[in-house]
Amino acid sequence: MNKFIQYIKDSFEELNTNMTWSSREEAQKSTVVVAAFTIVFALAVASIDKFFHTGLDWFFNQFN
């Protein structure tokens, strides 16, 4: 158990002393870029799905 506690302490020390963190502004800009890309990608996937769904409905309705 003592090794685990030491590991946690060492991890926090490394995060506080050896890591370089982005500025708040840079992190906010990156978050906006990721959110925008996610929305665009979701819309593209939804559009492709709708296209195939419509096409397959039309195709299978030809046999009714």
Image (cartoon, rainbow, N blue to C red):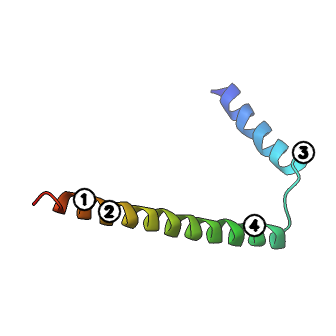
Q: Camera-side residue: 8 or 41?
A: 41
- Residue 59's mark? 1
Disc 4 marks a residue whose amino acid type is Ser
In the displayed structure, would residue 6 be above or below residue 39? above
Farthest-out residue, left? 64
Q: Are marks 1 and 2 in contact (CB under 8 Å)?
A: yes
Q: Camera-side residue: 29 or 43?
A: 43
Q: Of discs 1 and 3, which sits in the foreground?
A: 1
In the displayed structure, would residue 24 be above or below residue 6? below
Residue at x 17% of width, y 61% of height:
62
- Residue 18's mark? 3
In the displayed structure, would residue 36 be above or below residue 57? below
Disc 3 marks a residue whose amino acid type is Asn
Q: Residues within 10 Å of mark 2 (few under 14, many from 20)?
A: few
Q: Which residue position is annotated with label 2?
A: 55
- Residue 30's mark? 4
Residue at x 32% of width, y 62% of height:
55
